[in-house]
Image (tube, rainbow, N blue to C red):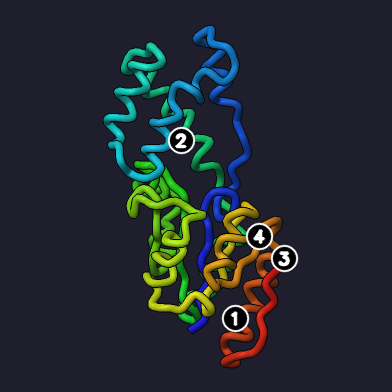
Amino acid sequence: MACVILDIGGVLEITPPTGWGRRWEERLGFPPGVVRERMRDVWEAGRVGSISEREVHQQVEARLGLDAPEAEAFMADLWTEYLGTPNEELIAHVRGLRGSCGLGILSNSFVGAWERETARYHFDELVEHIVYSHEIGIEKPDPRAFEAAWTSLGASPEECLFIDDLAGNVEAARATGMRAHRFEDNVRTIARIAAHLDVGNRGGGHVPLG
């Protein structure tokens, strides 16, 4: 069965930079880049689920010198950029595919993302399976992340079209045997999905890799 697996940030969510980190640096009197450097290992741990949300907040307070309300505001700004706004057109298209193909999500995520994205966007109702890096402890472009995604759908890599906004992840997916498409806009992405499903429904043939 043909399957479509999508990234979240930059694909199903529109997530332009908001500048929140630099605003906090200015507020705290830090030079540019200090927040990123001080929090680097915490962000890395959050992406693979080796730290809890509570521990993230504790580290934000300790490393940036914030009190509890300030840390809450800091994290709220982080989540505002992280969650962005919904790509309504693509989400509606994917919703219309339900029942005609396998549908999944593979996302490099952060601890707490499942709860927030489920509450705001109901991605759990959009697709059959969601594979979050913070839940499996593995990030793209590790081949094991892609394997987790196609396995969750009971599919082979060749049956799956993976859509991501980062070229490195697209290339890594292709190296596993998946079909892959780099998201640049909805028109080309929707056309690429249609081509993949057309070939899949006809039971064979060549599917272009672009």
Q: Are marks 3 and 1 in contact (CB under 8 Å)?
A: no
Of the numbered discs 4 and 1, the one sitting upstream in the chain is: 4
**Which residue is identified by label 2?**
79
In the image, is 177 to the left or to the right of 75?
A: right
Q: Earlier in the sequence, mark 3 or mark 1?
A: 3
Please, what secondary structure does the residue beneath circle 1 have?
helix
Decide which of tag 1 and tag 2 comes sooner along the chain: 2
Q: Residue at x 30, y 35 (%)?
A: 53
User: Image point 43% across, 58% down: which residue?
Assistant: 123
The relative height of residue 69 versus residue 162 in the rendered view (above or below) is above
Q: CA distance from mark 1 to mark 2?
A: 34 Å
Residue visible at 57% across and 92% down in the picture: 203
First along the sequence among labels 3 and 2: 2
**Up-down relation of residue 94 to residue 141 (above or below):** below
Q: Amino acid at mark 2?
A: Trp
Residue drawn at (63%, 84%) of the image: 198
The residue labelled by disc 1 is 197
Q: Are marks 4 and 1 in contact (CB under 8 Å)?
A: no
Name the spot of residue 55 as percent of width and height, x first.
Answer: 28, 29
> In the image, residue 195 lies at what x, y percent?
67, 79
CA separation in Å, label 4 and label 2: 25 Å
Amino acid type at image mark 3? Arg
Q: Circles 4 and 3: CB distance less than 8 Å?
A: no
Give 21 or 206, whichever is nearer the viewer: 206
Q: Nearer the viewer, residue 208 or 82?
A: 208
Numbered tag placed on residue 29 in the rendering? none
Residue holding disc 3: 188
Spatial separation of the CA atoms under disc 3 and disc 2: 29 Å
- Taking depth in this image into account, of 77 and 31 the one nearest to the observer is 31
Q: Dot 4: what SS?
A: strand
Disc nearest the viewer among 4 and 2:
4
